[in-house]
Amino acid sequence: MLWTLAIHHLLYLIEFGVDTNDDGRWHNGRYRPSHSDAFEKWIAKDAPGLERDDLVRCLRDNPLDV
């Protein structure tokens, strides 16, 4: 479950920006939760399920503006 919510959090950051520090926001009539709490828990557990190649591919396909 944490893995799925962590992915949703990363997609949220891609869509709304990495400087976003909120619990969620309304977008196109839908509430989009950020799932930041679940992401932090996932990181604290050493990001189980994340493979390096998957992360590289995700960042290549969805570059972050920092």
Image (spheres, rainbow, N blue to C red):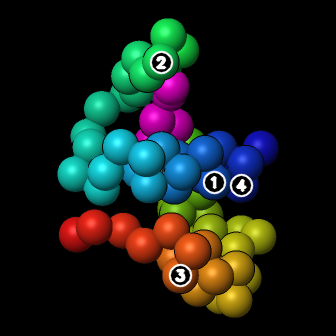
Q: Is residue 2 left or right of residue 23?
A: right
Q: Residues within 10 Å of mark 2 (few under 14, many from 20)?
A: few
In the rendered image, residue 23, in percent from the top left (x then y), is placed at 38, 28
Tag nearer the camera, 1 or 3: 3
Q: Quadrant of the N terminus?
A: top right
> Which residue in the protein does label 2 denote?
28
Q: Residue type at mark 1: give it.
A: Ile
Foreground pick, 28 / 40: 28
> Which residue in the protein does label 4 denote?
3
Q: Residue type at mark 4: give it.
A: Trp
Tag nearer the camera, 1 or 4: 1
Tag nearer the camera, 2 or 4: 2
In the rendered image, residue 37, in percent from the top left (x then y), is placed at 47, 40
Q: Which residues are magenta?
A: 32-37
Residue 27 picture quarter: top left
Q: Residue type at mark 2: give it.
A: Asn
Q: Which residue is at a point 51% across and 55% down the rendered structure image?
A: 10
Measure how far apart labels 1 and 3 are at the Cα level.
Answer: 15 Å
SS label for mark 3? helix
Q: Can residue 37 be seen in this snapshot?
A: no
Q: Quadrant of the C terminus?
A: bottom left
Measure how far apart labels 4 and 3 are at the Cα level.
Answer: 20 Å
Foreground pick, 45 / 27: 27
> Which residue in the protein does label 1 denote?
7
> Which residue in the protein does label 3 denote?
60
Q: Residues within 10 Å of mark 4 (few under 14, many from 20)?
A: some
Say which label, 2 or 1, has the lower sequence index. 1
Q: Residue type at mark 3: give it.
A: Arg
